[in-house]
Amino acid sequence: MYEHMVLFRFASEPSKDQLNTLYAMARQFPKHIPGIVDVAIGRDTTGRNQGFQVGLTVRFVDRAALDAYGPHPKHQELVQYSLEMGRTDIIVVDFPIES
């Protein structure tokens, strides 16, 4: 399995409606993108976020599923929406999960 982690930073505070839309888009991934095992998304509550307001994790069955995810139209819709929300930066970390 592979874990895909993303942290989002926005220029200004996203509205509740914007966040709800972003969350709903991500939570629909398993219905549309093959090879996804699990999705989690939410707002940071620790205050240790260094300006990154939202975290996303997507777990895939294998590396091939992760590779297919990037160009998938549903993923690209979320990327575009995050830019429209004022996304200024992201951090992405992908790693294999040892069983």
Image (spheres, rainbow, N blue to C red):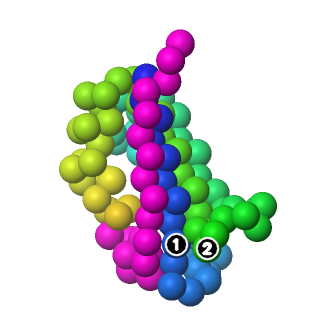
Q: Which residues fall within the magenta stretch?
A: 80-99
Q: Earlier in the sequence, mark 1 or mark 2?
A: 1
Q: Are marks 1 and 2 in contact (CB under 8 Å)?
A: yes
Cα separation, mark 1 vs mark 2, equals: 6 Å
* Residue type, numbered disc 2: Gly
| Residue found at the very far bottom of the displayed protein | 12
Q: Which residue is mark 2?
A: 51
Q: Nearer the viewer, residue 4 or 42?
A: 4
Q: Which mark is residue 68?
A: none
Q: Which mark is residue 9?
A: 1
Q: Is residue 91 magenta?
A: yes
Q: Is disc 1 placed on a helix, strand or loop?
A: strand
- Residue 62: where, in percent of width, then height? 35, 24
In the image, taking residue 3 as reference, residue 71 lies left or right, namely: left
* Residue type, numbered disc 1: Arg
Q: Nearer the viewer, residue 87 or 74?
A: 87
Question: What residue is drawn where x is 61% and y is 83%?
Answer: 13
| Whether residue 6 is situated above or below residue 14 in the rendered picture | above
